Image (cartoon, rainbow, N blue to C red):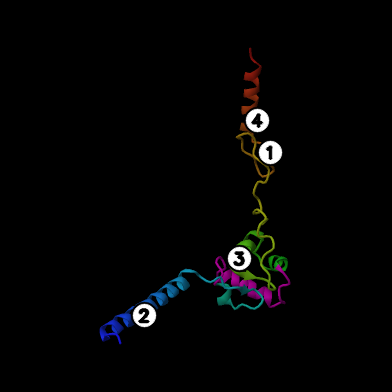
Amino acid sequence: MQPIWKETIMSIHQHIARLLLAAVTALTTLATPALAEVEANRASQAELETVKGIGPALSGKILAARERGAFKDWTDLQERVAGIGSGNSARFSQAGLTVAGSGFAGLAEAAPRAGTATAPRGAGGKTDKTGKADKADKADKARKGEAATRP
């Protein structure tokens, strides 16, 4: 039989170990935010607003469009709700929003925002929305061409 003080020390060690395990579990749970799935066809306004980037105005637009019927897919949501395009669809999907049970399929190839230049820039020159070099760039190229042909 062990002395009482040894049993007490062992009991204290067991309690400390349990407390440490509980603390680590609690901290791990709090430190890793759960990515809750929010279904656009069933979510309340408050639930929609838990998705990063969706505020009261956009959640109201989603609910108003949903009154006319459930969204079939992401394309349907984009067509019926102003302010949701490919870029926002990708962001909302990454934040947990689903439509008809699916995430946004175009996550990798989300289209660039409308009105941005898609043509590659010239050699250090600027381009406008049509991809054409500006006048200063053309003049600079002409001067360089003249300098190269001089003896």
- Callout 4, which amino acid? Lys
- Callout 2, which amino acid? Gln
Label 3 with label 1: CB-CB less than 8 Å: no
Q: Would residue 9 be visible to someone looking at this image?
A: yes
Q: Find out whether residue 38 is within the magenta segment.
A: no
Q: CA distance from mark 4 to mark 2?
A: 79 Å
Task: Say few, some or many: other residues with alpha carbon within 10 Å of mark 2 (under 14 / 14 to 19 / 20 or more).
Answer: few
Q: Find out whether residue 72 is within the magenta segment.
A: yes
Task: Say few, some or many: other residues with alpha carbon within 10 Å of mark 1 (under 14 / 14 to 19 / 20 or more).
Answer: some
Which residue position holds label 4?
138
Q: Secondary structure at mark 2?
A: helix
Which residue position holds label 1?
132
Count of labels in the image = 4
- Callout 1, which amino acid? Lys
Foreground disc of the pair 4, 2: 2
Q: Quadrant of residue 6?
A: bottom left
Point out the stretch of residues depicted in magenta: 50-73
Q: Residue at x 33, y 83 (%)?
A: 11
Q: Earlier in the sequence, mark 2 or mark 3?
A: 2
Q: Would residue 83 be visible to someone looking at this image?
A: no
Residue pushed farthest top?
A: 151
Which residue position holds label 2?
14
In the picture, the disc for residue 92 is 3
Q: Report the quarter where the C terminus lies.
A: top right
- Callout 3, which amino acid? Phe
Question: Is 16 on the left-hand or right-hand side of 115?
Answer: left
Task: Say few, some or many: other residues with alpha carbon within 10 Å of mark 3 (under 14 / 14 to 19 / 20 or more).
Answer: many
Q: Nearer the viewer, residue 97 or 80?
A: 97
